[in-house]
Amino acid sequence: MPCQTIAQPRSRENPAKMHSAGGTAGPALVVFVLLAVFCFSTCAAALTPLRLSTKSLAFGSVPVGSKSTRAVTLTNSGVVREVVSRVAVEASSFGISGPALPIFMAANQSVAFNVTFAPTASGSATGIVVIGCGLSGALEISLSGTGVTERPAVSFSATSLAFGSQSVGATSTAQTATLTNTGTGSLSITSIALTGANPSDFAQSNNCGSSVAAEASCTISVTFIPAASGSFAAAVTVTDNASGSPQSLTLSGTGASSGSPGVSLSPTSLSFGNEPIAAASSSQTITVTNTAGAALTISSIALSGSNPTDFTENNTCGTSLAAGDSCTVVISFTPSASGGFTASLSIADNASGSPQTVALSGTGMHVVVLSWSPSSTSGVEGYNVYRGTTSGGESTTPLNSTPFTGTTYDDETVQAGETYYYKVATVSSSGTQSTDSSEVSASVP
């Protein structure tokens, strides 16, 4: 039933004007006027009742212990004032807040309420908001929501970190493991600490803080500093609110007695063969290994010898190499002219025999590179390439001994200062050769 208006009291007229000469018409007129006012107010309210912006609110899934809020608007769409005397929620997990009661609403006035859902347990919940106008009736909003329990879970990118052999008293290169919260709730971290048999021989740092959000990650970094020779073991232990707490990341390493570092280079020489002038060769790799029990201190890695500028190097070695560790040096060859080139890769360090060297060699040569689009003619099995030193004077004997299926050809037999002319012909499966292609020329500098 819609809320009704409250009729406003009217001032009394002069009694002398309310009576007729006979003395009986006055009271009847008063009753008629009051009934007319009441009827007008009731009818107006019935035609334009209070209206809510919604008749239902669905909160969906809300974590237990948290709160979700939805706004509701109540509007007086009538032409007279309305009075709201009751606002209530019939459910323990839901609540409502708004203006203090009673609420006097002028015509076309709106007021806002906030309805909340704060589940205290998992599962579905329903309720009703009741907005009432005294004895005249009430408006209702149906409520629904589901409380869900969020649970964090811990996953490590690696279950263990092995540091291998490390010189006594020297700090290893740091190794890292990623901790990820794979659950649906926030991970609260009480502590991250080193535990186990030899925690003092390791060190850890992390950026995890006191909590990790669902699906977020943080990093734990560990170093190994053996105090003596022998095997060492420990663990990074994470204490938190996830199932299976505490979780552990196992650590291991071996302390090696101090001694002179040793260096092994593999291979000890690199040959790049023939390479086109000004074109970079495919890269080749040299592996540097510290074969002794002490850290290798590297002063420099450089190219030297007769033609160092025709070679390039890049390395992963840094300034120190732990006992038993390896790094790589990548070499490429870019000849600046024709002829043979040599150089050396030199590694200066604190090992005996420093600097260690790797011999490098390669030959620069002029090359004419030909390329063409594949033939669309059916039955083509390969191609022949013909060359001459004058236009139209290509030899009748192809440069290639047998037809080949590719669409590029490197002519490595050219001489500096010469101009060459080329044509290409297709060869069918029966050995029939097509008409030659258009002629192209190339001048060798």
Image (spheres, grey):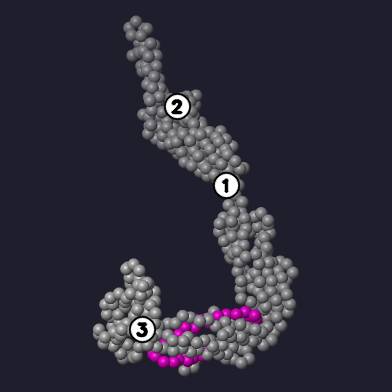
Which residue is the site of mark 3? 399
Closer to the chain start, of discs 1 and 3, is: 1
Q: Is the magenta stretch mostly helix, strand or loop?
A: strand
**Residue underneath mark 1:** 63
Q: What element carries label 3?
A: loop
Q: Dot 1: within a 10 Å radius of its alpha carbon, few (fewer than 14), some, or many (20 or more) residues?
A: some
Look at discs 2 and 3 and give the one toward the viewer.
3
Residue 106 position (above or below residue 434): above
Q: In this view, does 291 lie to the left or right of 328?
A: right
Region rendered in magenta: 322-346
Q: Which of marks 1 and 3 is in front?
A: 3
Asked if the magenta segment contains residue 335, the reply would be yes
Q: How crowded is mark 2: few (under 14 residues within 10 Å), some or many (20 or more)?
A: many
Estimate the x, y position of residue 293 in percent, counting from the top left: 68, 83
Residue type at the position of mark 1: Pro
Labelled pair 1, 3 in contact (Cβ < 8 Å) = no
Tell me the distance, in whole angstroms, between the alpha carbons under discs 2 and 3.
104 Å
